[in-house]
Image: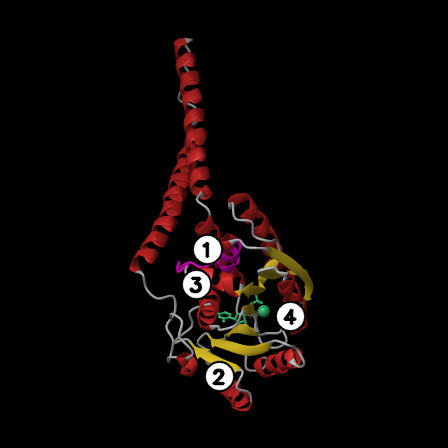
Amino acid sequence: MMISVVVPFLNEEENLPVLYECLAKMFEGRNETAEFLFVDDGSTDGSVACLETVRAADPRIRLLQLSRNFGHQAAITAGLDQAAGDAVVIMDADLQDPPEVIPDLLAKWHEGFEVVYAVRRKRKGEGFLKKMLAACFYRLFRTLCSVRVPVDAGDFRLLDRKVVDALKTMRERHRYMRGMTSWVGFRQCAVEYDRAARRAGKTKYPVWKSLRLAWDGITSFSAKPLQWMMSMGLCIAVVSAVLAVRIIVLRLAGASDMVTGWASLMVLILFLGGVQLAGIGLLGQYISRIFDESKKRPLYVLRANPPDQEDEGSPA
Ligand code: UDP
Ligand code: MG
């Protein structure tokens, strides 16, 4: 049986040789054969050169180069498209996903689970803001989306060939792979681990990028924000009808102080203006996603066709 390890990376020259050593050690003496599929997401440092040196000594290494930076989720997609294994493990290049967990993932897979995701028991070396936002996001996602995404699981997981084939048919542009792997179903289970700090280098996921991924996740899996917006509009309409009745009653009762209330008028006008603009913006977000889908561009572009394509190529 063959296991593909897919590692998307962006400028990780200090980490890649160490990661490779750990992976090679992990697969020593195991029954499964391995391929290590490194996906270069437009690195500009010496990552590719240092991978090519190790590749000369180990034919299990495959290198896939994207033509520019397409983003982590697209790089994972490229890896899944090209992976040949009976199971695929996706992991980060910075050793935050410890290779020592791979045997646990494989053990669950041999038990018959088709998706084994690694859940972070602890997260070291990450900012308080990021951890807090992540914790809030996973819970918000649960309330908004009917897809059950495991709380606190990253992209570190093992996928059976069947799952990979199902994912390969999903060519949507705004990709939230964690949601997509939950969506395909199959028997899924979790393995817990302590997430280490990044070994070297800086994070490539600053808070704004994480927020964008979170927004992609929500808008690709739920139309509830639109429903909420509509409900809010309806509530405001009901409240304004009640206010109108009150004004008419007061008028009929002969009240003459109707000119006061400049402040409340101003607040109402600004509030409604804000709500309307936000609503239009939200609608625009969904429409722009339709626009992106309708262009049908490829999800990534490869710098060159992989040299080992002759083993019955999969779609690029
Ligand atoms: N990465 C990538 N393309 C990007 C950003 C990140 O391939 O545009 C890779 C990165 O090299 C690493 C993984 O995705 O292997 C996770 O990124 P990072 O460790 O920076 O994120 P964090 O763990 O801080 O959330
Ligand atoms: Mg990391």
Q: Residue flagged by tag 4: what amino acid is it?
A: Ile
Toward the top, the furthest residue is 253
Q: Residue flagged by tag 3: what amino acid is it?
A: Lys
Query: What residue appears at the point 64 percent right and 70 percent down from the top-left corner?
Result: 102
- Image check: 212 left or right of 121? left
Give the residue pinned by disc 3: 168
Pick the quarter of the image with the N terminus. Answer: bottom right
Q: How many marks?
A: 4
Q: Is mark 4 within 8 Å of ligand 1?
A: no
First along the sequence among labels 1 and 4: 4
Q: Is mark 3 within 8 Å of ligand 1?
A: no
Mark nearer the viewer, 2 or 3: 3
- In this view, 221 is above or below 155: above
- Image check: 108 left or right of 162? right
First along the sequence among labels 2 and 3: 2
Front-most of residues 187 and 67 = 187
Give the residue pinned by disc 1: 216
Label 3 element class: helix
Image location of residue 200, percent across then percent down? 61, 77
Give the residue pinned by disc 2: 48
Q: CA distance from mark 1 to mark 4?
A: 28 Å
Q: Which mark is residue 102?
A: 4
Q: Quadrant of residue 122?
A: bottom right
Q: Look at the image and tell me whether residue 196 can be seen.
A: no
- In this view, 91 is above or below 134: below
Image location of residue 228, percent across then percent down? 46, 38
Image location of residue 140, percent across then percent down? 56, 47
